[in-house]
Image: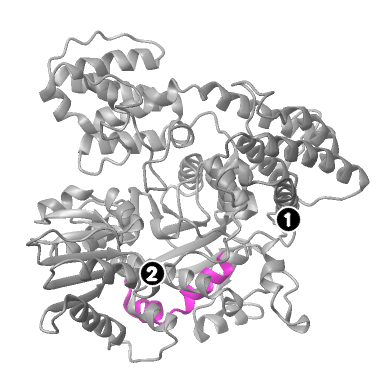
Amino acid sequence: MSDGATATATADTGMGPGLALADRSWGKVCTKVKKAVVFMDAACAESLHWAGGMDRLLQAGALNVKEFSSFEAGASGQVKAVFVVSTLLKGRTAEVIRDIVTLSSFQYCVVVTAVSHSVHLFANNMMADMEQELVFEEFGDLLSQWMGNMNYTGEVMHLPILIAPIAPHLCITAAYSSLFSFVPQDLKLINKNRPDKKKFGSLNDIDFQSLPFELQIQIRSLVSTLNSMFELLQLKEDCFAVGPTSRIIAGELANCPQAKHRRKTAQHKASIVFLDRTLDLSGSVAHHGDCLVEKILGLLPKFPGLTSDVKVNMMDLTSVQSNEDTQNMIAPGCLAQPNDPSAKTLWESMLNMKQKEAVMEVRRHLVEAASKENLPIKMSLGRVTPEQLNSYVRLFKINLKALENHCELLQLTMATVQTLGHPSYSKWDNFLAFERLLLQALGDCDLSRVLTQFLPMIKSYEERDHSDYNLEEILVLLVYIYSVVGELKVDNVVDKAECDVKKALLQALCDEPNLSDLLQEITGCSSASALTFDKAASIVDQAFETLRSITRARAHMKQFKAVYSPGDDIHQATYKPLVKQVIEEIFHPDRSDIVDIEYMSGGLTELLKTGFSMFMKVSRPHPSDHPLLILFLVGGVTASEVRMIKESVSMHKPSCQVIVLATRLLNPLDVTRLIFATDRLHPDIGI
């Protein structure tokens, strides 16, 4: 690493900070799995997926790795089990562990939870000495009880295993993929059960204690995970926030007792800026034209059980005939290739490069691999096509040794080929063209006329062909429109235009013969037959309430009030990403106070320092003070934004290292799902 802030922690390994934490934590898990059957939940599996994969456990001596489910159990003769979970050891999680243990013949059980003991105490409303792990000791006794003999060993430990290292400069917090920043409509839900005199006037007034209990647990657990990461890096961080959700999370981190203790001896300084996704949804649903990874994530199906990887069809590398009966016979490929240096380098290049450069880099790696194996490759210059890449890939099919040696590289190549040749690839460009036209239209007319022009694009199932937008895509475009527009001046004309769009959307929804996964989640109906007209009408009304609330997301801001510039006679209308505006303000040469980036005090000393700066020559903490900047996007980040962040920081302050943290890697449908989710304030935390 080039920066001193992370050099100490990662100098020996050459790893990024996220991988260093994941490597250390999973290394400790590996010391427990010898001769054990391992049961693991999806969030922990996603972290391991990017930090070495299941092979890591098998090489450490694990007998088998199974899904964390009440329908699983140990086989006859298996006497040791290791449970790896991302949740609290209570409620449904405890029930599943009990079910597995009582169905098995274990004599030694180890439970590894990603939730710290302090969060367990908070969840159980207990006060205790932080040195005594009472909850874990009690659960260890329960394990012995379930095994049927109190002399059998039940061991419980906490490890921070929820950081998934996507790249050296990019990590996601796998277990918090459902965590999304507040939508203004959430204010009504939070106020619902509060007395009139105690209702909040705005989202900025909401504090941690007023949140639903499940959300409090999720935030405390996230803060604990971040603290573990910063402990490894020996960081003393200043916390900043942009947006009401970020303000709560940053405040919890700043005042966390374990974090305060860590900062007393930390050797390196950093700034962490939390940023609400809701403040700029346009960037997360937009279809950027120059990012290969974003198109891969948006067009290929999700890898089963994971939020931030895709399923790559590897059938073309086999002799199996592709049909309905064989489609699940061959294990899918994926993007995560942490164990192959060449594939890992290519993946990082794909993330950091524009699409044309990235595709050429894929070809270069493939040609080099073919040359090493003496395969009869015919080099051709010029534009890289999916057909050309596919012809190179087929050379490996006839040489099993070459196929085995370069399997990881071939997975990334197949992901590229299947994306470039995807039936919806051309529609991605249509989206991009529409978004650009929309920006120009908003400069020439108001929202009502834009919606009127948008109306003919909403077609029912019978009217659509492959080039038309389906209902999911219509929702994506509506989110883009309402987020770009910003605060609305609502009048009868806008109401009428919205009413027409709602009628068309309602009709199209009722005419759907089958509901997609997204529409099932939004409607709460598992089939089209279960969706009544009244239910559909209510869903459409709620969707537009949410869309209207999105326009108010930046209403409280001073500097970052708009992401849209209408243009003039010389310049075209443009979209300016909020995260780019934030970076420009952070590194502005005059270092003026940034009104919309709030410093979160971590105690009396910082509070006094901040207060004295108003009337004394005491410099207030500023996000550009330190050589390491960590940006945490609450609600997720797109691959395009990751590259933009890296390039923007490099341009403004090349000496500054930047790390991007996010709750997940996003595609447009992910964002739509999270925005319209009905349980956003009540996440499933396993209790």
For numbered disc 2, what is the local secondary structure? helix
Q: Residue furthest front?
A: 529
Q: Is residue 375 left or right of residue 383?
A: left
| Numbered label attached to residue 140 | none
* Residue type (three-letter) at the residue carrying disc 1: Ser
Judge whether 9 appears above or below 583 on screen: below
**Callout 1: 10 Å neighbours few (<14), some, many (20+)?**
many
| Quadrant of the drawing holding the C terminus | bottom left
Instruction: From the top left corner, tell me how far across and down residue 492 is, in percent.
Output: 93, 46
Judge whether 188 appears above or below 468 on screen: below
- Which residue is pictured at 62% across the width and 81% down the height? 611
Residue at which label 2 appears: 92
The stretch in magenta equals 246-268
The image quadrant that residue 482 belongs to is top right
Q: Nearer the viewer, residue 571 or 546?
A: 546
Q: Residue furthest right?
A: 492
Residue at which label 1 appears: 549
Q: Nearer the viewer, residue 303 or 616?
A: 303
In terms of secondary structure, what is the magenta stretch mainly?
A: helix
